[in-house]
Image (spheres, helix red, strand yellow):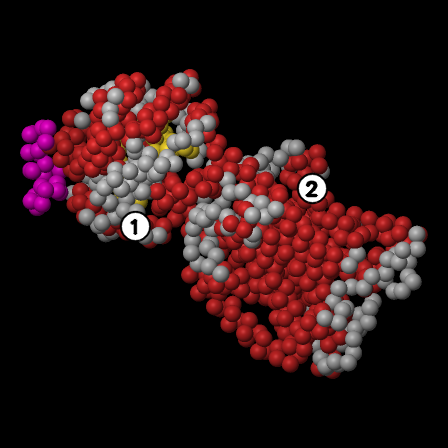
Amino acid sequence: MAVGIGNIEGGEAEDEDLFPETTPAEKAEYVDERYSTEDGTETDTAYTEVYVRDESNNALSKEPLLDTLQYKQTVLENESVAVAIPADGEITSIASIVAAAAADDPDATLDEQIGALESTSEAEVTSIVSEALSEEPEARQLVSNSYDPETTSAESHQIIFVFETTEDGEINDAVTSHLFETASDRENPEYFTLNEHALVEANEQMNENTIGLILPVALALILGVLAFTYRDLVDVIVGMVGVVVSIIWMFGILGWLEISAGITMIVGPVLIAALSIDYGFHIFMRYREQRDSGEPIRPPMNRAVRSVSIALCLVTITAGIGFLSNIVNPLENIRDLGLGITFGVISAFLIFVTLVPALKVSIDQTLERFRLDRQKHPLGDGAVLRPFLQSGVVLAKRAAPIVVVVALVATAGSAAAWTALDEEPFEQQTEPAPEWMGELPGPLAWEDPEYNLNEIYVQEQFQPVAQNEGDRIQILIQGDVTNDETLTRIHEAKDTGVFAESTGNTDTVSVLTAMDDLAEEDDEFAAAISEADTSGNGVPDTNLEALYNEMYTLSPESASQVIESTDGTYQSIRIIGPADGGGSLSERADDQTAVASTVEDDSNLTATAVSETTILQSGIEAITDGILHVMVLALVSVFVVYTIIARYLYGSATLGAVTVIPIVLVTGLVISGMYVLDLPLTLVTALLMSLVIGLGIDYNIHVSDRFAQELEAGRNFSQALEAAVVNTGGALLGSALTTAVAFAAIILHPHPQLENLGTLVVLALLMSFLVSVFVLPSLLTIWARFTLPTEEVTETETTSPSDD
């Protein structure tokens, strides 16, 4: 299996691959294929920023501006960079604008700009900067929000490099690497980028931080809880060996089958470790129950494996179904995750019913030859834990209907919580790590990557510069675009307020603006527009096809920006403009979609709002729908399969149904917990919904299976319920605590994405455990009252279940 790991493809997804294909995304591709840019050519350039920050808090003074020009000169000395800059391209910065003004030549070369700025006094530079920033909106976008007009100072500014792209639409890696390296070499002013090379360095630092702090804390907590629950070093080691082998098997199978690991590389070990630890607890605790004083080791282990293997097999089947339900998810990454985890679950089952018991028997036999006693007591038999676990049984006997009603109300409340969850594509770290983390001793000290701090700074200080249509909102209108009402609808759409006020090169462009521009240059076309305007409002409302024809005749470059012409017919038109950035992501998406609706309502037109906002929001909605589909499919599949299995194994389909019902409650409680703790619904939290179902059914099956076994062994209802909840509950408690503390360590991570991941998993584990020992017993009690003979459902509080 280990050899197969070498065949694994990491499958790192690009950002755009993290979301399913949606209508806005499809229409964005359509626009890219069918429409030209402002000069009539296909887009083959991209831009990247380098930020300049001065320690004196005035990056607009002469020396920092001069240093910026010299930095550009250094960058351009690299052959890869020089080749990648388009013939008509430029490097935009406030330094170039000021230096060109100082040279009194807008076309001054970089050397001429440097010479002119060197010969300009500080006072003159300040005057030029003030004039440029007050009169040129494009220049103001290059300066940070810290700009103070009274002192003509700002802490930082940005340089925008435009480069030709490679065949995959990206900037050449050698170019971005050179920008990163040259920026890192300069100290004052400070230069930095946020490109992929800066991110790689940040990830390396983050890994060091995680290995230095999170991993040791997690391991210490896991070993501490395992030591407390197992109370035996040998069992801890054997159990961890089983966990590691299970994970290796999972990746080995993926490798041999040549399935991309992708996000399974991150989430897979976490989920399989959780299930493997659970499997180990049940094997070891049942073995301890089965072994009588003075009995040899092998027979009780055989009985324990036979006894618990049915429950483990059922858990494997049902958990596998839960994870495999992700095949209906719209995201390929999540579909691969479901497949990978399913293989991991099967691997864990095989390892813990074969290898782990064999190791345990071999080691215990060897130790007992040296007269080391290997007789251990199961968890849940202590003076503290036993009364705690028994309280679930007592509650079931005295108030089962009340418990069930409360559970149903809690589940119903989760529906409202689901609709109230915030939806975000990803969570960003907006604050540096707490100071105390950096003050920890030695390798435990946390060092925030410069990338994170710089990213937070840029988000606070700079607004994105709209360099192309991709940064704006587009309304793509398809259908009979020559219909007389079409341009009237466009005119109404522009007045909805979703388009921001036009500044500089970010004017709103549409068929109407293109017509107006041509009318200013051609009187005959102006007359044609006037003739086509029967309402007198300045908007043509008849004979539109003839006007489109004339536009393509007079200026095909201008017309092709806003009108799609194929073989002489007009397939679509579009509006392009700067989007109003107010409101949350969903609010902006709703506003933009509403504009499209005003165009297509009561018409034969189809209008789609295309922007980064609508693409992200539609992706989130698709993921949300995917989660619902997965959860419904998983719950229904598990319900059907386990009901059939329960009918075959226990002779009662209703017992199977009762076992599955609490999973709905666990899912509901986790959703309610997310709402209370203000955890947003993101791509990462979406992935963990399978964990909720997988662990929920796991814990319930163990309790229910033990309950059925005890009844079959001749115990009465009360004895069977107590054995199931107290003895099996002890193993469940150990499993829940061990996995929970491991994930609790992740909460220390300052990134909210990982912090919330840890919080959600801990929440799912605790809810699964509590429901299995406090709600399921009440359901089993009600089931017993309706299905078992009356004389069997009697309270025998003084009778304790004997060991098998």
Residue visible at 78% across and 75% down in the picture:
800
Please name the residue that numbered disc 2 is placed on.
248
Residue range (magenta): 520-543
Q: Is residue 273 magenta?
A: no
Q: Is residue 542 magenta?
A: yes
Residue visible at 78% across and 50% down in the picture:
238
Residue 533's disc number: none
Of the image marks 1 and 2, the number of the one nearer the N terminus? 2
Dot 1, crowdedness within 10 Å: few (<14), some or many (≥20)? Answer: few
Q: Is residue 202 left or right of residue 136?
A: right
- Does dot 2 land on a helix, a strand or a loop? helix
- Answer with the quarter of the image where residue 211 lies: top right
- Answer with the quarter of the image where residue 153 lies: top left
Q: Is residue 567 above or below residue 241?
A: above
Residue visible at 59% across and 78% down in the picture:
401
Q: Is residue 554 above or below residue 733?
A: above
x and y, in percent, of residue 357 in the image: 80, 52
**Amino acid of disc 2:** Ile
Residue placed most toward the observer, 575 or 226: 226
